[in-house]
Amino acid sequence: MAALNAASIAYAIQNIVLDGLPPRYHSVVDLTLGDGSSTYPTGGVPITATSLGLPQGQIISFAVLEQTGGVVTAPVANYNPTANKLQFFVASTSGTNQHLTEATTAYAPAAMTLRCEAIGY
């Protein structure tokens, strides 16, 4: 199975606003990824800042606002700014009140859409 990568993500920009001094881009973007067979790469899925509507490719802030698809078993998505990757966290064991751990390379997420907000240049 192939691992998810930056090219595995479909980016659909919903809104971009230029604001502040110096001007920063505030972008709302839907990221669609996962197919149930492509696996999670070690450390997370790389994202492309320019595809988020940030022309200089610099992310200041990134947040997942909403998630649809695969909701019952969906991972919790989190942005790692140091690695510029989207990381997935899942329950470590079945049951209730379990800790979340980063997904392993055996994890193949189902199709999902993440509505995100990116701020940057």
Image: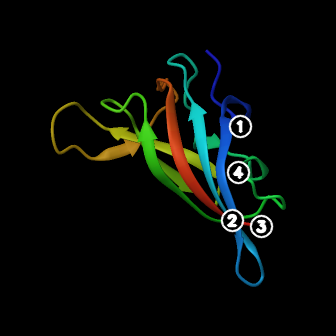
- Residue 52 is labelled as 4
- Residue 17 is labelled as 2
Q: Is residue 67 visible?
A: yes
Image check: 2 left or right of 111? right
Q: Residues within 10 Å of mark 1 (few under 14, many from 20)?
A: some
Q: Residues within 10 Å of mark 3 (few under 14, many from 20)?
A: some
Q: Is residue 41 visible?
A: no
Q: CA distance from mark 3 to mark 1?
A: 19 Å
Q: Residues within 10 Å of mark 4 (few under 14, many from 20)?
A: many
* Amino acid marked by disc 1: Ala
* Amino acid marked by disc 2: Val
Comes first in the chain, label 1 or label 4: 1
- Residue 6 is labelled as 1
Identify the secondary structure beneath mark 4: helix
**The furthest residue to the right:** 56
Where is the N terminus found, in terms of image quarters? top right
Q: Residue at left 55%, top 51%? A: 116
